[in-house]
Image: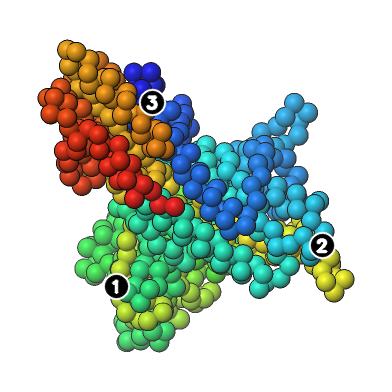
Amino acid sequence: MQYSKLLLPTLKEDPAEAEVVSHKLMFRSGLIRKLAAGIYTWMPAGLRSLRKVEQIVREEMDRAGAQEVLMPAVQPAELWEESGRWDYYGKELLRFRDRHGRECCMGPTHEEVITDLVRREVHSYRQMPINLYQIQTKFRDEIRPRFGVMRGREFIMKDAYSFDTDEAGAEDSYRKMHEAYTRIFERCGLNFVAVEADSGAIGGSFSHEFMVLAESGEDDIAACTCGYGANTEKAEIKIASEQVTGDAPPMEKVMTPEQRTIEEVSAFMGVTPNEVAKTLIFETDKGTVAICLRGDHEANPAKVKNMLGANTAELAEEATVREVTGAPVGFAGPAGIGCPVYLDNALKGVASFVSGANEADAHYKNMVVGRDFTPAGWADLRMMEKGDPCPRCGEPVDVKRGIEVGHIFKLGVKYSEAMKANFLDRDGKEKPCVMGCYGIGVGRTMAAAIEQNYDDNGIIWPVPLAPWEVVILPLMDKEGRTDAEAAKLCEALEKAGIEVLVDDRDERPGVKFKDADLLGIPLRITLGARGLAEGIAELKERASGDEHKIALDETVKWATDWVLERRIL
Ligand code: ATP
Ligand code: MG
């Protein structure tokens, strides 16, 4: 491939809005261009890498026995009404009407469509197990699209759905996908972990997330040396459940004008943040509730949902806070509040605490659970933190940042029951199919690879994902010998099956070197007039920076061997 003919516009400057490295580098190296918030065009070089991720995914899904299909992006509302998700999926679901006034949506995921397909086509236990997958464009109207293609609104996902006759079969399908995902991310050259996760809006009984370890990740992962790993959202916190009691003086109201945050209140009252109970109001589809937790802890909406068996739980709007507390935001507390109050287990370790008085500019001190108010219940309602005990072995966990690139769920019969995807079993009985679903963010995986592999000069592609494996830089010479030699070398390498980019542009060496580094092509071959006179090419490995002077007639073999050793099959 000749650079001079390619649409490969590299830039010196980072885009102003780019917050993370992969977004900056994908933009600067001409891999993507933005059309609108969270909506991108894949440029020729970017598409080559994206297709490589897709190909790895495809090969491993096929190897695991899944069959590829391609489902529509536009989905009728009726299917979503059948599954019950039309009402609660929220604003991420882009809804519209067609010319006949029928309600539709752009598919954010395909459980409904696949379940509809399978109930029409699969009727007998003989047709199962079956696993169908696609690599297709999804639309989710994300509240905060950012980080380029990592959190887009329109993005490419691989989604697979398995259908089994029973639990044991479904578990086997799940295990196969777990293995396939492990192979996929290994072949992409990523450093990742599979952790236990919350099943969220998709529903289902258990799930794992595949996390690429990177500081820019949006998720926190609790990890223990014993091998335990979980999203902090999901990680169960097991702490001593004995309630500490003391003889606190009677509860007392203290005026705290304009003191709203935990820091302000604790400083004002002369206590530490872990002696303040923060009270948060959540609106859920099971009603409004208040959650109390230690001031230094972080509330966990996923656990709030699970505790209530709710589908949604979001921090309440100001109007709701005023309604249940009778006070402005910042003064909510468990005593006298107009909704049920649930306490996080960690408050058991606090004999008496400070909390809002449900009155403007007022807090209570010396609050004691049971004496001054009665909670609706106790539960584990917070995010796990570094140092919390591992639920498996009890040792303190570490917390790391991760990018979720894949997610597998055991769904059970949630969709098949709601949508009547039944089959006739061996025993002649009609039963619902037992399902699993499995997603991979294809563009996000590619961006995550950049988050793990870059330096000040640009991307450092793992060989399996690089848009080209080798770049040849013929440097300007008067006789044009370097160009001729580059063309020859390119042809020979391509014949050997290597993907080559020749930078045949009429540019200074410095520009070519910079762009080759920015693009992150794993192996660079420089052909200069002086080297040619001596019969050598200069090779440089992008990742290690190692340089090699190789005889011209050995270059094809050397480069081919180098690349083949690094392709992960
Ligand atoms: P997140 O928590 O990051 O929003 P999710 O739980 O909503 O992810 P799933 O519904 O499990 O994601 O989707 C499967 C995969 O699709 C994810 O693991 C991720 O790799 C990818 N993905 C999800 N949302 C986006 C997005 N907005 N942009 C790009 N990829 C995405
Ligand atoms: Mg999401």
Q: Which residue is mark 3?
A: 1
Residue 559 image offset from top left, x and y in percent = 29, 40
Which residue position is annotated with label 1? 387
Amino acid type at mark 1 = Gly
Residue 231 at x, y = what percent? 42, 63
Q: Amino acid at mark 3?
A: Met
> In this view of the protein, can residue 569 be seen by the observer?
yes
Q: Secondary structure at mark 1?
A: loop
In the image, what residue occupies the spot 22% across and 18% down?
A: 481
Helix, strand, or loop for circle 3? loop
Identify which residue is drawn at 19% across, 36% down: 551
Q: Is mark 1 within 8 Å of ligand 1?
A: no
| Along the line of sight, the residue nearer the viewer: 239 or 499 | 499
Residue 124 numbered mark, or none: 2
Q: What whole-number distance in Å separates the C-alpha atoms at marks 1 and 3?
A: 53 Å
Tell me what residue is drawn at x 72 percent, y 29 percent: 98
View extreme (front): residue = 553
> How packed is label 1: few (under 14 Cα within 10 Å), some, or many (20 or more)?
few
